[in-house]
Image (spheres, helix red, strand yellow):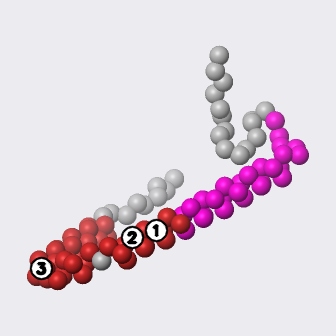
Amino acid sequence: MRNDIDSPGFTAPNGRALGNERRTVALAELVAIVGLALSTIVAATVVSVGIARANVVGNVIDNEGSLFTVALLLGLIFIAMGGLTAFTLPGHKPKKH
């Protein structure tokens, strides 16, 4: 028979309170937070270096500058249209009881 897990993560099971395990749980949470922060920093660094080395914009502008300008202008227009649409949506008003 399989038991369902009610509360996953670092918390204690529902039927039992934490005793001496609090320090271990705090240490596990700290290690998880530090690991996630470091991996995020490494991923951001790798992506930044990849973008810097790619130099895609320079190659596109050298060959077809007018096409790049049109694409950039269309992109900015689409962004402006999306922002205008988001601002004109009706806001959520809480119901009064």
**Secondary structure of residue under mark 3:** loop
Say if 21 sits above or below 51 in the image.
above
Say if 52 sits above or below 43 in the image.
below
Mark 3 belongs to which amino acid? Glu
**Secondary structure of residue under mark 1:** helix
Give neighbour class at mark 1: few <14, some 14-19, many 20+ (Cα, 10 Å). few
Q: Name which quarter of the figure residue 12 lies in.
A: top right
In the rendered image, is residue 36 in sight? yes
What residue does disc 1 label? 46
Mark 1 belongs to which amino acid? Val
Position of residue 40 in the picture relative to residue 71 (left or right): right
Position of residue 42 in the picture relative to residue 65 (left or right): right
* Picture disc at residue 97: none
Percent coordinates x, y for residue 75 in the rendering: 21, 73
Determine contact: label 2, label 3, CB under 8 Å: no
What residue does disc 3 label? 64
Determine contact: label 1, label 2, CB under 8 Å: yes
Asked if the magenta segment contains residue 87, the reply would be no
